[in-house]
């Protein structure tokens, strides 16, 4: 099977199986020098891999220090983490932007239905200011596909967002407000409003802008000030071309081509399908980089969903850092 056919199958909307995952592993082991070197360093017996748990996962920090790609190609786009002035940012070299578009569009439709039924508002000031953000790229495409004249990005124009939301509520227009955490808090505290037809999606990201709060504290403030029953969340990062969504309470679910596992904090090669520990992610949309990523996030995985509790204490501060609990 060609790589193109494999990619098409991965994003077809059908459940992936281990054989597809194994084909991706072999393709990347054979064509990604960084990943091959990592597997060899771990003395991986390639012939003995008979489950997802036995596949080596590449530490996410490699995206800061190495060019994680399969073969040599001219990327159509390079995503860069927002980071801070004190950190080295991750870079994700994307061979085909269409793979990312296909991934996030199909994922959005799985959780929310047709995009053109919504007005999409993006309250993402720090990402817009930084540039090269995969989140901004995704949002720009969703805004375009929504075909609603009120859809768009906003920096610190909270008064404008308030007026647009009031108008959309009067029109009973289905709306999704994507927002970085600190901007959602600022907006909710300065312009409380009753929302009945609007979904609020927290994309994470305090970046030292405010006192650190738990996710529960943040979402309680948003619910009270925006008159909503629940706050939804999006889990994504520069190093991934797929996202997971939580409809409430931080319980995330993945698209069919993305899987989450857990590794033991003291023994990173001990990987399980469920349990509490550090999160490993299989993202088959990362076909031309690395699909097997060992993140720095601490979480809990069940058979139905996964939760994220924050980052390992000694990991770098990331621009889209999640709130601790």
Image (cartoon, grey):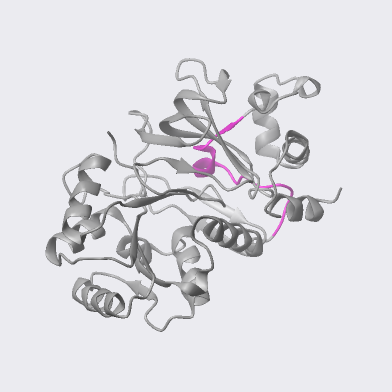
Q: Residue at x 68, y 31 (%)?
A: 37
Q: Position of residue 184 (x, y in %)?
A: 25, 59
Q: Image check: 259 left or right of 250?
A: right
- In this view, the residue in front, 195 or 98, is 195
Q: Residue at x 32, y 61 (%)?
A: 126
Answer with the quarter of the image where residue 183 lies: bottom left
* Residue reaching furthest to the right: 1
Q: Position of residue 145 (x, y in %)?
A: 52, 75
Q: Position of residue 264 (x, y in %)?
A: 49, 19
Does residue 261 show up magenta in the picture? no
Q: Image check: 174 left or right of 4?
A: left
Magenta segment main secondary structure: loop
Quarter of the image with the C terminus is top left
Q: Image check: 319 left or right of 195?
A: right
- Magenta segment range? 57-73
Q: Residue at x 24, y 41 (%)?
A: 216
With respect to residue 127, does 10 lie above or below? above
Labels in figure, total: 0
* Residue reaching furthest to the left: 190
With respect to residue 246, does 150 lie above or below? below
- In this view, the residue in front, 17 or 133, is 17
């Amino acid at each position: 099977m060609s790589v193109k056919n494999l990619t098409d199958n991965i994003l077809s909307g059908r459940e992936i199986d281990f054989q597809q995952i194994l084909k991706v592993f072999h393709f990347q082991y054979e064509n990604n020098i960084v990943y091959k070197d990592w597997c060899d360093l771990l003395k991986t017996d390639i012939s003995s891999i008979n489950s997802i748990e036995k596949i080596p996962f590449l530490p996410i920090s490699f995206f800061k220090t190495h060019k994680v790609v399969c073969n040599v190609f001219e990327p159509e786009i390079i995503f860069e983490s927002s980071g801070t002035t004190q950190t080295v940012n991750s870079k994700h070299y994307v061979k085909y932007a269409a793979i990312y578009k296909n991934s996030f569009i199909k994922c959005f439709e799985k959780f929310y239905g047709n995009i053109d039924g919504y007005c999409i508002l993006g309250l993402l000031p720090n990402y817009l200011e930084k540039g090269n953000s995969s989140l901004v790229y995704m949002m720009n495409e969703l805004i375009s596909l929504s075909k609603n004249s009120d859809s768009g990005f906003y920096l610190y124009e909270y008064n404008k967002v308030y007026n647009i939301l009031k108008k959309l509520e009067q029109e009973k227009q289905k709306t999704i407000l994507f927002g970085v955490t600190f901007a959602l808090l600022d907006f909710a505290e300065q312009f409380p409003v009753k929302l009945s037809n609007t979904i609020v999606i927290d994309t994470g990201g305090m970046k030292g802008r405010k006192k650190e709060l738990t996710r529960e504290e943040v979402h309680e403030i948003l619910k009270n000030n925006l008159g909503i029953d629940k706050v939804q969340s999006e889990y994504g990062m520069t190093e991934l071309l797929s996202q997971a969504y939580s409809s409430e309470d931080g319980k995330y679910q993945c698209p069919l081509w993305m899987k989450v596992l857990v590794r033991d904090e003291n023994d990173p090669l001990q990987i399980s399908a469920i349990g509490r520990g550090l999160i490993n992610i299989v993202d088959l949309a990362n076909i031309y980089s690395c699909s097997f990523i060992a993140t720095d996030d601490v979480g809990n995985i069940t058979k139905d969903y996964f939760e994220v509790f924050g980052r390992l204490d000694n990991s770098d501060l990331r621009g889209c850092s999640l709130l601790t609990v």
